[in-house]
Amino acid sequence: MGKPRAMVALAAALALLLSCSGVVVRGQDTERIEGSAGDVLEDDPVGRLKVYVYELPTKYNKKMVAKDSRCLSHMFAAEIFMHRFLLSSAIRTMNPEEADWFYTPVYTTCDLTPWGHPLPFKSPRIMRSAVQFISSHWPYWNRTAGADHFFVVPHDFGACFHYQEEKAIERGILPLLRRATLVQTFGQKDHVCLKEGSINIPPYAPPQKMKTHLVPPETPRSIFVYFRGLFYDTANDPEGGYYARGARASVWENFKNNPLFDISTDHPPTYYEDMQRAIFCLCPLGWAPWSPRLVEAVVFGCIPVIIADDIVLPFADAIPWDEIGVFVAEDDVPKLDTILTSIPMEVILRKQRLLANPSMKQAMLFPQPAQPGDAFHQILNGLARKLPHSKSVYLTPGQKALNWTQGPKGDLKPW
């Protein structure tokens, strides 16, 4: 970055910071989302669908959590809390004959390394085993080959079940799930791991923990750009350039000494408070395009700067991401300072007003107990909008829609 350009960017940012320090978006200073998105965000799914929850042996779910309670707090935990929510939800039916949707409570990410990362190797076998179980104990899977079933698959690349994109693409979506609706955190346009009709959801972020770190609403936003996290993953990408497609490395190399950028690999105890003191929070891709920072930024009113080409964002029909966030192409990371300092004050203030809307924050969270408009309800809204099912989802007698022996040999081993 040349010195003249740097000086101009610094001057612009300082002027913006001085302005923002005296302009605080308070809880009541919010703006409702206009148009269909606002209506969708506030939809109530109760009365619009019924879901039957299969009762599986506890080895598929509860025993996994009992073995490793870390599953309850990592960013893949939506699969656990969705199960718990549905068990007591008003949309649950105990009569499968009247169900619109069928849900299989299987926790494919609750098999962790000592470092807390999900192991991808058993996940396909766990899922295959669960599908085999429901197909042999109930008639409902077999009549549609899963087309009226939904699964929560919060892996890095959804039902491709691998954390490295190259290997995820090579694997593709687990063949048995190709007619089912997938509820997943991963979303990228024209990608083999995102099938048409999937429902994209936010990753899990602990609502109660975040709530305990709220700062007074009058706290000024005195940090221009904030980020905490890895820039390189030397353990899994020793040569560099593959992790985050080089975007995080570019952030570090271009802005590590820039006073406008508060960026570091350190994760301080004041992390949540710092986000509430920042105007912009970087949300770059990692191994996958999505990250919990997106949830944290929205909840804490920090304008998310989304650096992930072709990302498909959570609940995009309800949340106007273009209006609340800033999108920066991965190749444009070296120009981040110029891009952000060029955004007019009135645009920034409107984004902050929209982010201050409680319904926006609620939609990104999986609280316990559930609350109206939260992520659980947004998922149900998405399922309700797919009804009624087309007659074409039902198979004719003798019709085969799935190949049960398709896929890598390792996936076919019993679990």
Image: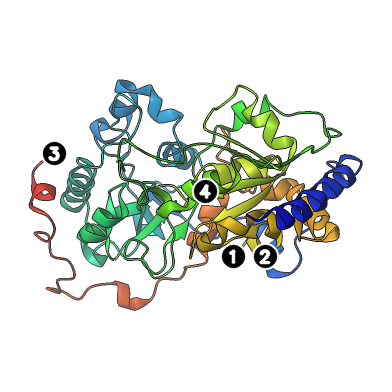
Of label 3 and label 1, which has the lower sequence position? 1
Q: CA distance from mark 3 to mark 1?
A: 38 Å
The quarter of the displayed image where residue 171 is located: bottom left
Of label 1 and label 4, which has the lower sequence position? 4
Q: Is residue 169 above or below residue 241?
A: below
Of labels 4 and 2, the one closer to you: 4
* Amino acid type, residue under disc 3 in the picture: Trp
Q: What is the secondary structure assignment of the residue under circle 4?
A: loop
State the residue position of label 1. Answer: 317
Q: Is residue 153 above or below residue 58?
A: below
- Please state the total of marks drawn on the protein image: 4
Q: CA distance from mark 1 to mark 2?
A: 6 Å
Of label 1 and label 2, which has the lower sequence position? 2
Residue 112 coordinates in the image, percent (x, y): 30, 30
Q: Is residue 8 above or below residue 70?
A: below
Viewer can see residue 374: no
State the residue position of label 3. Answer: 415
Q: Are marks 1 and 2 in contact (CB under 8 Å)?
A: yes
Viewer-nearest residue: 301 or 368: 301
Q: Crowding near pointer 2: few (<14 within 10 Å), some, many (20+)?
A: some
Viewer-nearest residue: 354 or 240: 240
In the picture, measured across the screen, residue 59 lies left or right of residue 48, that is left
The quarter of the displayed image where residue 332 is located: bottom right
Q: Which mark is residue 37?
A: 2
State the residue position of label 4. Answer: 202
Q: In the image as oriented, which residue stretches furthest toward the front?
A: 3
Q: CA distance from mark 1 to mark 4?
A: 13 Å
